[in-house]
Image (cartoon, rainbow, N blue to C red):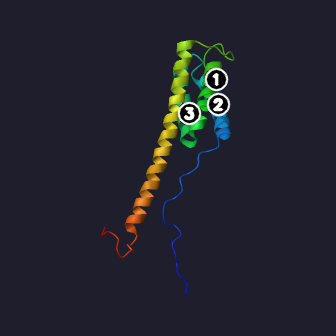
Amino acid sequence: MIEWVSLSTGARPVPRPVATPLVWATAFGGALVLVALLNTTVGPDRPALALAALSLLAAVLGFCASFTAAPGTAVLCWLLLNGFAIPPAGTLSWIGHRDTFWLACLLTATLVGTALARLAHARAAYRTVTSATASEPNDEPYAGRF
């Protein structure tokens, strides 16, 4: 006798984060393209706009990455922000309060993106588990009597 069994019982696995080197390569390439685009369209004298755009990029990359990739992603975005989004282009500098704030913004954006991804995946897995267990018939004869 052939018995048909559903293959989609239980929870779906939570998606694995993208490998950290791939996230960092995407952060470097994406930040380079984004800074070049901003420099050609609005000019290099707009670091606040570049910081906002790079923070958005960091948050999107954080959504795909693990928590361990966050510091490297933030530093790579900061390097391109510091080196090419403020004049003189191609020169790295360190101004304590400004660069600390920029690094904190980029790191926070990356961590928020990663945390939101983990919450979204956990919620989806939880809803799958609860809907699967609520819709299954109760096969145990003594369930609910204790």
138, 70: nearer the viewer: 138
Count of numbered circles on the image: 3
Which of discs 2 and 3 lies nearer the camera? The answer is: 3
Which of discs 1 and 2 lies nearer the camera? The answer is: 1
Residue occupying the point 62% across, 44% down: 18
Q: Which mark is residue 58?
A: 3
Give the residue type at disc 1. Answer: Leu
Measure the C-alpha gap from mark 3 to mark 1: 13 Å
Measure the C-alpha gap from mark 1 to mark 2: 13 Å
Judging by the rendered image, the residue that carries numbered circle 1 is 79
Give the residue type at disc 3. Answer: Ala
Q: Residue 93 in the image: x percent, y percent? A: 64, 14
130, 24: nearer the viewer: 130
Sequence order check, earlier mark of 2 and 3: 2
Q: Is residue 72 above or below residue 138?
A: above
Q: Name which quarter of the figure residue 102 lies in.
A: top right
Judging by the rendered image, the residue that carries numbered circle 2 is 33
Badge 3 marks a residue whose secondary structure is: helix
Q: Residue 125 in the image: x percent, y percent? A: 47, 55
